[in-house]
Amino acid sequence: MQKKAANFLNSVVACDECDLVQHPIPLHDGGWALCRGCEGPLYYRAQGGLDRAFAFALGALVLFLVANAYPIIELEIQGNRISSSLYGAITQLWHQDMKTLAALIAATTIVLPTVELVIMLSILFALRRGATPVGMSMLLRLLHEVRPWSMTEVFVLAVLVSLVKLAHIAHVVVGIALWSFGGMMILLIAAGQAFNLQELWEHVNPE
């Protein structure tokens, strides 16, 4: 009974606009499927398929490693230079008894983006080799839960706002880490667009 229910759930798709449940249709690269009820967009098949998504995700991972290895900003005040990396900023917040804020920043800018990238790369690497990852359905569900909490773009925007304010009192030098975070943000968005969850669910073998 459970296997039949799993097979049914994996063979249908629900419209986000009108909640109509319907069977998916095969698409060509770059094609969109529309809801039969409200004609809203259901899902699409990205150009380039798995290879494109894997390239974007791998590039995002490289930039993510660079972003965590180098300073985000460097301040020069009266001849004194102060630089800080993301890890250093989190450590300072922790030691200044702002542990909740430090944990929140660490989770949304380091831990969850890492989990998202590892899951994406693991799935794509296996599928590109013609295999289905063990526990793929669980990985896809976890990815769906993690994505909304991975807030790299919010962090980059907050840093940019801070730089504007600090520019009035100090000479601000943007570090390579901030540029890397910006590039990573763009690649993550591109990977998310190419990483079609509906297409990937077709590879799931219900247990």
Image (cartoon, rainbow, N blue to C red):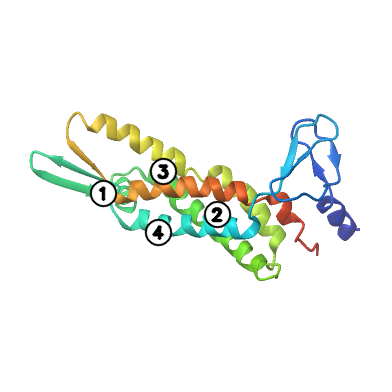
Q: Mark 3 highlights which residue?
A: 100
Query: Which SS class for mark 4?
Result: helix
Label 1 vs label 4: CA separation? 16 Å
Query: Which SS class for mark 1?
Result: strand
Q: Mark 1 highlights which residue?
A: 84
Label 3 vs label 2: CA separation? 22 Å
Image height of 4 relative to 99, above or below: below
Query: Which SS class for mark 3?
Result: helix
User: If the image is split into quadrants, where does the C terminus sit?
Assistant: bottom right
Residue 187: x, y in percent? 49, 49
Q: Mark 2 highlights which residue?
A: 116
Which is more N-terminal, label 2 or label 4?
4
Q: Mark 4 highlights which residue?
A: 65
Residue 43: x, y in percent? 73, 43
Label 4 vs label 3: CA separation? 24 Å
Labels 3 and 2 touching (C-beta < 8 A): no
x 87%, y 58%: residue: 2
Residue 6, by quadrant, is bottom right
Label 4 vs label 2: CA separation? 14 Å
Query: Which SS class for mark 2?
Result: helix
Near mark 3 (Cα within 10 A), the count class, few <14, some 14-19 or many ≥20, is few
Near mark 1 (Cα within 10 A), the count class, few <14, some 14-19 or many ≥20, is some
